[in-house]
Image: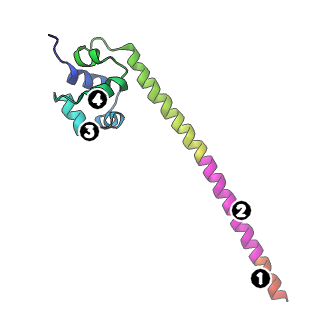
Amino acid sequence: MKEIQFAKNLRNLRKMYGMSMTELSKVINVSKQSISKYENGCYPSFHIVIAVAEAFNCSLDDLVYGDIEKNPNKNSLDFKDFVDKRLDDLKKEFINFNKEFNGKIDDAKREIFKSIEITEDECNEDRNV
């Protein structure tokens, strides 16, 4: 019977990608404390094992019984590429949002200044009458 290597493989995969426990916990939707427990030998529920395998793009067999440290799955580097691309996309979205938001603020400022000018002009007309 094969020896279960889940805890060691989870830790190795997380470190391979430079992820903190907190970052991984957000990806698979568990607490940081749960990640710590899993890395120290507690077994997660099956749906968590599936989520980890999907997150790191590795097979359940490799995750549970494999030796990720000696034989990392080359395809699991796709996950890092995916995260990097998603971060770049989010940065672009933020920059575009910021431009749009600043444009709307500038429009609002112009409207406010126009209304102030109109009010001043009206006040000056009232004084001259």
Q: In the shown orientation, is residue 60 left or right of residue 123? A: left
Q: Which is nearer the N-term, disc 1 or disc 3?
A: 3
Q: Name the residue under label 3.
A: 32
Q: In this view, does 3 lie above or below 24?
A: above
Q: Residue at 14% of width from left, 10% of height from top?
A: 1
Mark 1 neighbour density, 10 Å: few (under 14) some (14–19) many (20 or more):
few
Q: How many labels does the image show?
A: 4
Q: Which is nearer the N-term, disc 2 or disc 4?
A: 4
Q: Do the residues labelled 3 and 2 touch (CB within 8 Å)?
A: no
Residue 68 makes an appearance in the image: no
Q: Which is nearer the N-term, disc 2 or disc 1?
A: 2
Magenta highlight range: 98-119
Q: In this view, does 30 lie above or below 120?
A: above
From the image, give the main secondary structure of the stretch colored magenta: helix
Task: Give x and y (percent) for residue 63.
Answer: 27, 19
Task: Give x and y (percent) for residue 110.
Answer: 71, 62
Task: Give x and y (percent) for residue 93.
Answer: 56, 40
Residue 47's tag is 4
Residue 22 makes an appearance in the image: yes
Q: Is residue 51 above or below residue 104?
A: above
Q: Mark 2 points at which residue?
A: 110
Q: Residue at 33% of width from left, 28% of height from top?
A: 51
Q: Mark 1 points at which residue?
A: 123
